[in-house]
Amino acid sequence: MGRSEWIFFYFTIVHTRA
């Protein structure tokens, strides 16, 4: 538990900033 959340967070930011 840790990397999965980071990837999800990063994906959300990238999609929101896209």
Image: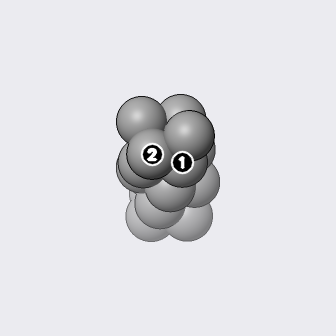
Q: Residue at x 42, y 36 (%)?
A: 16
The image shows residue 3 at horizontal and vertical percentages of: 55, 64
Q: Where does label 1 land, which residue? A: 14
Q: Residue at x 45, y 45 (%)?
A: 17
Measure the alpha-carbon separation of dots 1 and 2.
5 Å
Task: Pick out the residue farthest to the front.
Answer: 18
Q: Where does label 2 land, which residue? A: 17
The image shows residue 11 at horizontal and vertical percentages of: 56, 44
- Asked whether disc 1 touches disc 2, contact meaning CB atoms under 8 Å apart, the reply is yes
The reply to whether residue 12 is in sight is no
Q: Helix, strand or loop at disc 1?
A: helix
Say left or right for 16 vs 18: left
In which quadrant will I find the C terminus?
A: top right
Q: Nearer the viewer, residue 12 or 7?
A: 12
Say left or right for 2 vs 14: left
Foreground tag (1 vs 2): 2
Q: Residue at x 50, y 55 (%)?
A: 10
Residue type of the residue flagged with mark 2:
Arg
Q: Residues within 10 Å of mark 2 (few under 14, many from 20)?
A: few
